Amino acid sequence: MFDHEQILSDYQQNGVVRLRRFFSAAQVENARSEIERYIRDDLASKPADARTLEANGETVRNLWRLELHNAFFRDLAQQLQITQLIKKLVGGEPVLQGVETFNKPARIGSGVPYHQDNAYFCQSPPDMLTLWIALDPVTLENGVVTFIKGSHREGELPTKMSGVTGNSIGLAEPPATPLEEQFHATLQPGDATIHHCNIIHHSAPNQTDQSRLGLLFVYRGAHTKTDPDLQAAYAEAVAATPPA
Ligand SMILES: O=C(O)CCC(=O)C(=O)O
């Protein structure tokens, strides 16, 4: 259904692509129900680093490591229909590295500072990406993820510890590109983006009454290796601001 060659070319050029109707309405509802069920029935029995809470200490900001803790999402992320596309973009055998959520709940969903994901993933070469699937409408008001197209070609930029729980490392300097020139990835439920691990992006807090739930599948090529310098910087940041 999707033109893989066109997606590859856009991805290489821009570092981010938007895919309309990636999930059907039924897939969106199944994923949402499973997230709700998992939070209600399973989360309490998982390790503390299976989630990050918002500042109220109650509402889930992120679920982490669902590929370990939840067979439904592990299987969903490894479906051939998805991994055949990912294989092209990571330039090798795709390895599922993470399944996560960024829930961005209404009124209390916190922001995500400017960052490159490879400051967290620490892979060389940076053949790693995130498939971000909207389960709610993503609007300009409720915390849309905003990308600087082409910035993935700048390599890993200097970082600093952010102090943000769940997003402990960010860019040392804010980017020069003004916000209005950035790509605001507004999405309908079921739409998705794929972004390269070195693209600069961020998202604002959600001050609306509408939740903005995103489901994230993270993949790398089997050929990537952990870079010790990147990993040392990340370890310092995550020790200073643990996810839980
Ligand atoms: O969903 C968000 O608000 C941020 C997502 C993000 O930073 C990421 O996918 O790396």
Image (cartoon, rainbow, N blue to C red):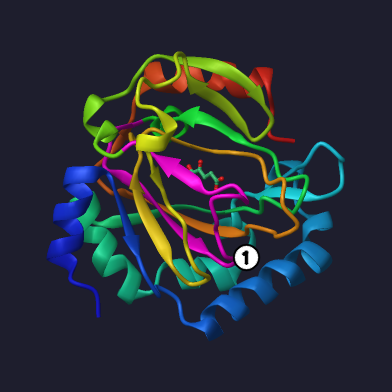
Quadrant of the rendered structure where residue 72 is? bottom right
Q: In the image, what residue occupies the spot 39% across and 57% down?
A: 193
Q: Nearer the viewer, residue 181 or 168?
A: 181
Whether the magenta-drawn stretch holds residue 25 is answered as: no
Position in image of residue 8 (x %, y %): 17, 56
Residue 232 can be seen, yes or no: yes
Total marks in image? 1
Crowding near the residue tagged with mark 1, few <14, some 14–19, many ≥20 C-alpha atoms within 10 Å: some
Mark 1 lies on residue: 70
Is 173 placed above or below 3 here? above
Position in image of residue 199 (x %, y %): 34, 36
Determine the secondary structure under disc 1: loop
Is 33 placed above or below 144 here? below
Q: Nearer the viewer, residue 48 or 137?
A: 137
Quadrant holding the N terminus: bottom left
Position in image of residue 179 (x %, y %): 43, 33
Q: Nearer the viewer, residue 243 or 202?
A: 202
Residue 125 can be seen, yes or no: no
Q: In the image, what residue occupies the spot 47% across and 32% down?
A: 120
Quadrant holding the C terminus: top right
Residue 185 located left or right of residue 227? right
Residue bounds of the magenta highlight:
123-148
Residue 43 located left or right of residue 64? right
Q: Nearer the viewer, residue 22 or 33?
A: 22
